[in-house]
Image (cartoon, rainbow, N blue to C red):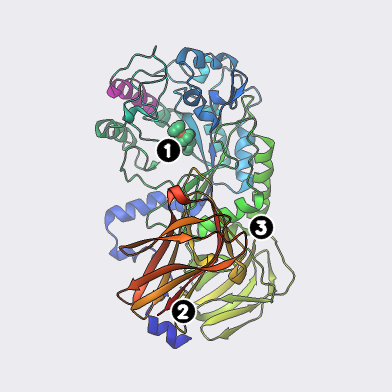
Amino acid sequence: MKQLGLFFGILFFLFSCAPKNQEQKDEATLKQDAKMEWWRDARFGMFIHWGLYAVPAGEWNGKEIPGISEWIMARAEIPVKEYEKLAEQFNPVEYNAEEWVKLAKFAGMKYIVITSKHHDGFAMFHSKASKYNIVDATPFDRDPLKELADACEKHGMRLGFYYSQAQDWHEPGGTYHNIEQGVPHWDPELEREPLMNYINGKAVPQVKEILENYGGLDILWWDTPRGMTEEAATTLQAEADKYPDLITNNRLYRPWPGDFSTPEQHVPPTGLDYDWEVCMTMNTSWGYKRNDDNWKSSESLIRMLVDIASKGGNLLLNVGPTAEGLIPAPSVERLKEMGAWMQKNGESIYGTSASPFFKLPWGRCTTKKTSSGNILYLHVFNWPKDGVLRVPGLDARVKDVYLLTNPKQKFAYKFEDNDVLIHAPTVIFDPVNTVVVVKTGKKMEITSNMPSLKEGKILMPADFADIHNPGYGTHAVLSGSGTESLIQNWVDYRTRVEWMFHTSDAGTYRIEALVKSEQPGKLTVKLGDQNTETEIPSTDGNFEIISLGEIEISEPGNQIISLTPVRENWGSAELMYMELVKL
Ligand code: H79
C-alpha cells in the first residue's frame, strides 16, 4: 500500500494549501490576513432578510405568488405606489434586537448580516437620503438596525449590512432583474432615469449613512449586480475603501473580487482557493413566507456547517422574521438544536482549517495546528457498524485519540499499512455527528485516497463524487457511505457529477456504472477535451450495470471525469458507482 501510494506520487501534505510562511508573504497579503482573521475563525453567521415583503409573506390579492418572498414585488408585478402602501401596515412591535442577537449567539454564530435595503428599495434604517424608510414611512417609530447594532455591540457580535446596490425597483434609475434584456420595468408609471442618478442620489448617500451611523460595520454585503456599470461600482467602492477593516463580498459588479466569494443556496463540492461563504436558507425563501414549510432538518444543517468548515468556508444561515418582528418558530427550533451541538463541539469548527484528506467515506475532517503538533477533528456522520474508523493515508505520530465531548473517553488505535484504524465501540455517541479528536506530532503526511488503478480497474463510488448542484433548482443528494453510498434525486439536468481519480496507465478504458432509472436518458461523459454523449436505458426501477462507452486517457496522472445530463433527454437517475475498466 505504502509503496503504491508513493508510486502514484500523489502525496498530499497537510497545510499544503494553507498560507505560506509569514516571511514569504507580501505586505498586502499580511494586511488582508489581519483583516480577515476574525471572519475566517468565525465560520458561522446569521443572515437576516427582513423588509416590507414580510407583510404579504408570499401572498398577493389572495393568491400565493411562486418563488422567494422578497421577490414578490417583481413576481406579482406590483406597481410602486401600491407596494409602497405596505409601509403603512408594517409595525413590527414584537421586535427585540437583543433576543435576536442572543439567539444567534446561542446557535454559535459569530456575526450577523441583515438587509438594510433589499431590491424593493425600502430602507430598514433611518435614512435622510430617502423617505422610503422604516422610520419615516411606517407607524413603527424606531430604527431597528440601530437597535441591532447596539445589541451586537453589547453582546460582542460582529455586524454586517446587506445593501442591494443595483436593483432598486422603487427608483427610476434603479435596475431590475430583466433590465439587461431590454425589458421595461413592470410599472409604466415609473419613468426611467440613468443609473448614475440613482447611484449618486440614493445608493451612495445611503451607503455613507450605513457605514457612518451604525458604530462601524464589519461587513458590507452587496447583491445581484444586474445592470451595474463599472462607474457605478467604483463610485460605491470608493465609499467602502474609506473603512480599511470593512469586509465586502464579490457581488458589487461582475466580475469583482471583493474579500470573499458567495456560493448561494449550494455548497461547493470542494474548497475554493479564495475566502468564501455559503449563504443558505433553512426553508426555500429568504424573506418570511407564510406557506413555505420546506424546512431542512437540524441534522442536515449541522452537517452542512461541518461540511463547509471541512472545505475551509463559512456558512451564513438565513432567517426571515415576520412583519411582527419575530423569527419564525421552526427557525428558532433549528438554531437551538444547532447551538446545542455547537456548544459541545464548537472547538472543532471555530478557527479550523480545511480537511487534509481527499474524501472520508464516514464523514468530514477539520484541522488545527498547535505549538506541539496537529489536531484532526474527525466528524463521524456514519458511525462505523464494524467498529473500525479508518483514517486513510495518515502518516504521523499519534499522541492521543478521544471523544471531543468527553476527553476521558479514549479510543484505541493501530496502524495498518498506510492507514490508522481507530477502534470505535458500536455505541453511537451522537447520531448527527460524533467528533473524534486525533492529536499528532508536528510531522504529519497524508497520502491521498483518490480512486486509482487497481487490477485493471478504477472504482469510483458515489461518496467519492463531487456533486455540482445549481443554486436554484433541485439538488441531487448523497446517501449512505462506502459500498452503500448512493446519489439520489438526480433530477435537475444542470446537476453535474464529477470524480477525480488517478491512473498510472494511459490507454483505452470502458466506462461502467451501477445505475437505476425509470426512463431512458442521455448523459455527456467528459474527460479533458473529450465529450461523448451516451444513452442510459431504462432499468425499470432496478439497479443495473450499464455501459457508458469508452474513453481514451493519453497520459498517466490525475484526471477528472464528469457526467452531465443532456437537457432534452433527462428524467432522473440514481447512481451507486462508476468504474473504468482498462482494455
Ligand atoms: O437576497 C437573496 C435573494 O433575494 C437574492 N440573493 C439572496 C441572498 C437573489 N436575487 N436574485 N437571486 C437571488 C437569484 C434568483 C433569481 C430568481 Fe427569478 C428569482 C429566479 C427565480 C426567482 C427573477 C425572477 C429572475 C427570474 C425570475
Q: Nearer the viewer, mark 1 or mark 2?
A: 2
| Element marked by disc 3 | helix
**Residue 547: x %, y % from top left:** 47, 68
Residues at marks 1 and 2, CA–CA distance in whole angstroms: 48 Å
Q: Is mark 1 within 8 Å of ligand 1?
A: no
Relative vertical location of residue 42 with respect to residue 295 in this rendering, above or below:
below
Relative vertical location of residue 517 with respect to residue 224 in this rendering, above or below:
below
Residue underneath mark 2: 457
| Span highlighted in magenta in the image | 194-208
Tag 1–tag 2 contact (CB < 8 Å)? no
Give left or right: position of 188 versus 288. Answer: left
Q: Nearer the viewer, mark 2 or mark 3?
A: 2
Q: Earlier in the sequence, mark 2 or mark 3?
A: 3
**Residue 453: x %, y % from top left:** 43, 80
Please state which of residues 145 and 337 is positioned toward the viewer in this rendering.
337
How crowded is the residue under tag 1: few (<14 C-alpha within 10 Å), some, or many (20+)? many
Please state which of residues 386 and 367 is positioned toward the viewer in this rendering.
386
Residue underneath mark 3: 344
Q: Is residue 287 magenta?
A: no
Write the residue at 39% across / 25% down. Answer: 206
Residues at marks 1 and 3, CA–CA distance in whole angstroms: 30 Å
Secondary structure mainly formed by the magenta segment: helix
How crowded is the residue under tag 3: few (<14 C-alpha within 10 Å), some, or many (20+)? few
- Say what amino acid the circle numbered 1 marks: Trp
Residues at marks 2 and 3, CA–CA distance in whole angstroms: 43 Å
Write the residue at 31% across / 26% down. Answer: 182
Residue underneath mark 1: 221
| Quarter of the C terminus within the rendering | bottom left
Q: Is residue 204 magenta?
A: yes
Tag 1–tag 3 contact (CB < 8 Å)? no
